Amino acid sequence: MTNYKMKDIEGTVHFDGEMATKGFYFNKMCYSFNHEENRQAFRDDPEAYMTKYKLSEEQKQAVRDQDINRMLELGGSIYYLAKFAGIFGWNMQVIGGMMSGRTTEEFQAYLDSQGRGKNNG
């Protein structure tokens, strides 16, 4: 059996079993957003929806603040957070900007400068 050691990368959150446990209810809530009626229920009353899914007060505050980095620190999976982001119409450039401390336009310009932006192919 191979034993893999994960490399720590500065500024990133390692999503492991402990983080999955920490974020279980948060990620379960985000998964529920696969259905429009759940997205609408969240939009109608986010506090009740977060309570229904047993989010911690810290997780609720991260949602209120729309703080993607804090959501990750509190056990959010980037894959499930993409479902949450969809409620607000955020695309990956918006999320990338939030995560890197840039505006969406600054993040898009960075991607373009690296040959990875939507304007490069």
Image (cartoon, helix red, strand yellow):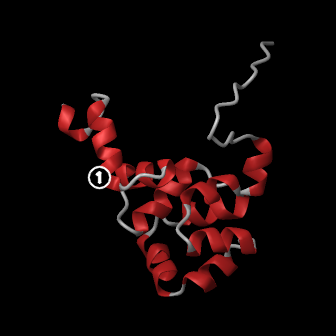
Q: Residue 89 versus residue 11: which sits nearer the camera?
A: 11
- Image position of 18 (left or right of 90): right
Which percent across, then down, holds residue 121?
A: 18, 31
Q: Residue 3 versus residue 14: which sits nearer the camera?
A: 14
Disc 1 crowd rating (10 Å Cα; few below 14, some 14-19, many 20+) is few
From this view, report whether residue 8 is shown above or below residue 83.
above
Amino acid type for the residue under numbered disc 1: Glu
Number of marks: 1
Residue found at x 70% / y 30%: 8
Which percent across, then down, holds residue 51?
A: 69, 80
State the residue position of label 1: 105
From this view, report whether residue 69 is shown above or below residue 8.
below
Residue found at x 33% / y 39%: 110
Kindly indicate the quadrant of the structure image that contains residue 71: bottom right
From this view, report whether residue 6 is shown above or below residue 106.
above
- Image position of 94 (left or right of 27): left
- Image position of 116 (left or right of 58): left
Residue found at x 69% / y 39%: 14
Residue found at x 48% / y 52%: 101
Which percent across, then down, holds residue 29?
A: 61, 66
From this view, report whether residue 11 is shown above or below residue 83.
above
Q: Dot 1: what SS? A: helix
Which quadrant holds the N terminus? top right
Which percent across, then down, holds residue 92?
A: 38, 49
